[in-house]
Image: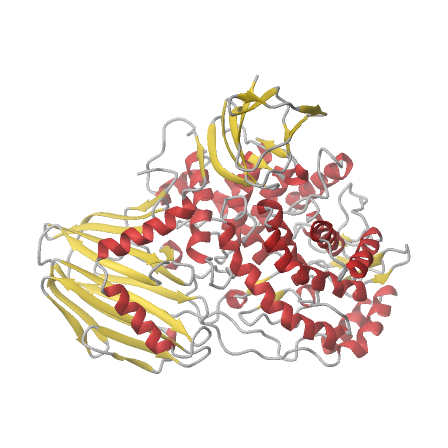
Amino acid sequence: MNPSTELYYNSPAADWNDALPVGNGRMGGMVFGKPADELIQLNEDSLWSGGFRNRNNPKAYDNLEKIRNLIREEKTTEAEELCADAFYGTNENQRHYQPLGDLHIWQSVGEYEGYVRSLSLDTAVCVITFTSGGVKYTRTVIASHPDEVIIVHFSADKKGSISFVSAIDGRDDNYDKNEAYDDKTVLFTVSDGIPYACAITVRAKGGQCGTDANRLFCKDADEADIIIAAQSAWRTGDYEKKAVNQAKTAARKPYEKLLDRHISDYRSLFDRCSLTLSPVGESITKPTDERLADVKNGVYDNELVAMYFNFSRYLMIAGSREGTLPLNLQGIWNKDMWPAWGGKYTININTEMNYWGALMQNLPECCTPLYDHIERMRENGRVTARSMYRCRGAVCHHNTDIWGDTAPQDKWLPGTLWPMGLAWLCTHIWEHFLFTRDEDFLAEKFDTLVESAEFFLDYLTENDEGCLVTNPSVSPENTYYATNGRTGTLCSGPSMDSQILYTLFSAVIGAYDILGGDEYAKTVSDIRAARDRLPKPQIGKYGQIMEWARDYDEVEPGHRHISQLYALYPADMISPVKTPELAAAARATLERRLSHGGGHTGWSRAWIINMWARLFDGEKVGENIQALLAHSTSINMFDMHPPFQIDGNFGGGAGIGEAVFQSECGELHFLPALPPMWKSGSVKGLRARGGFEVSFDWAEGSLSSAKIISLAGQPAVIRTDKKITVTANSKNIPLAENNGTYSFDTEQGMVYTISVT
């Protein structure tokens, strides 16, 4: 087994957080791997608790200026009381994510031995093997994107050994139909929430198979398959018929063809990129749960780190494909009718973190669900902007749902009244362009960028220093001590807001400079002027980057959010090279947070890894990756908040990538924050801003060689403290050397070889 790409265990899953995830982008399954009473918990990404509701508070605008004045006077308690009446959503909650149901398989086996349960990240194939009664049984589970089904394949080394009964239930037994559709298919339908149907079909070679009431059965077969398809009313009116047709269409194809189509589709994405880290000592081949236990005891397992990186890519491919919804707090994997935080899209960091690594990991197609959802939010965001704020453009607060609901969520001021959600998401549009240089994409999304920025041209107010700031707002989920000794959450001009707006405004300006046109000339001019009046990051009394416009103390100094360091990561406003004083303050901020117990959630630790990487501190990167694995990773490699949240998986994967390669600030930087224990390794197929693809290897902590493919013909700038030469087609490329960088022009499609001299 490859210790960097294969999860494996010598026992079935004891609970949900031990089960192995499979997914085809739209459908997900959690495979427990139980020999006699298998459980596969099922999801479909569009199963939510109900339809769209207009939750915009009609009292908001009439009270907006009153709240602003109270905040200016530091009467935070009064401002928050008024805000609770005027700005909370008229229904507290948006819609929440729900499970599809549970597939049970009762297989006719007795006591067993030789048990192995595995998930290959190379092929996206989950396999359970065991021996019972002298027969070796194999159960294989795949979630096929091309065929839009989940398939459970049964085989054995003795003919006539496959017998089982299978049924679907769940949803607290709240369903409409659970009955035989025909002699091979059972249909399970639910009308509560968003209506849907799930069809499960059985087929076999040898023996007998069919339906018995609401159950499938198979008796004395050589091989057999259960094929699962699901559709909802969110995508199609005829969801029952479509689910049945998808299951039956797949059932007409041989299993080998279904498997080949699945693996080929998956590998077309997964094989683009790879990371190899040489082991510390001998390669570790223990089961994954034992490896994680060893990490808790201080063992360094570089190949487990590489597997974490690969697992983040696996989850992205399994959970976010063209035409699906974006990944929510649990990705697509959720067992609860009322999941933690509703299983929604929390957009004050969590949804954004889900997609931090996807572009670098060469998976731009997997980001399209996010961009599609931004468009759903944009339409509703216009209504929220006008009805609650009398502003142009579009706005969303700190959460959204399947419908793109943009009204404030929850009755909890530290999170609720934060108007930056859509703005932050829209910066991902610009990032997509920076990585791909796709001007058609940029032109298609430019209106969306402008509308998100345009809201703030109307919403921003002038503070006492003449800067433009958000008011009211919050620093996400944090609370401060005001100068009068009271605690507060509402404020004017929290640092993160200004940093997001600087990034968004710069994106609009950069896009306009490329695309041109007269339609938005005046608006972009106004955005440029507004950007110049935004507050810059400020250094406070502890030498830290200030979180609020005033140098308040936090009620919780070890808070999980580190919002004031958005400028460091994911933005590039703070850099050890270009802003060393601010970088030192960012370091002080991290040290202060961590000294008070920060990083106690998985996603927060993942964010910290990325920040240390941007500060070029490989030792701290290594320490925090070790902490992520030891304290915030369940035995199936899921990130734990706790409970399970998938954002930390993607944030951690991004941070591992940032440790070995960065491309912000217009530079290609090899090994910027290499942990000391990663002495040698290699990378293939990482994407870089500027439209480049890079592959390289290193030994004893130093770059050995690299290749750069220019996908867009842009100039390349390499930051390194080594002397290098660059060749293409066996010819030396002239380099311009300047303060630790080497610059050269490139041609689209050309491969450039970097040699260390």
Q: Position of residue 505 (x, y in %)?
A: 74, 54
Q: Which residue is at a point 57% across and 46% down the rendered structure image?
A: 436
Q: How many marks?
A: 0
| Residue placed most toward the observer, 92 or 95 | 95
Q: Position of residue 190 (x, y in %)?
A: 38, 79
User: As drawn, is 231 to the left or to the right of 135?
Assistant: right
User: As drawn, is 85 to the left or to the right of 218?
Assistant: right
Q: Quadrant of residue 167?
A: bottom left
Q: Quadrant of residue 216?
A: bottom left
Above or below for 736 versus 339: above
Residue 348 visible in image: no
Q: Which residue is at a point 31% across and 56% down the rendered structure image?
A: 142
Residue 240 visible in image: yes
Quadrant in which the C terminus appears: top right
| Residue placed most toward the observer, 427 or 211 | 427
Q: Position of residue 139 (x, y in %)?
A: 23, 55
Above or below for 612 versus 679: below
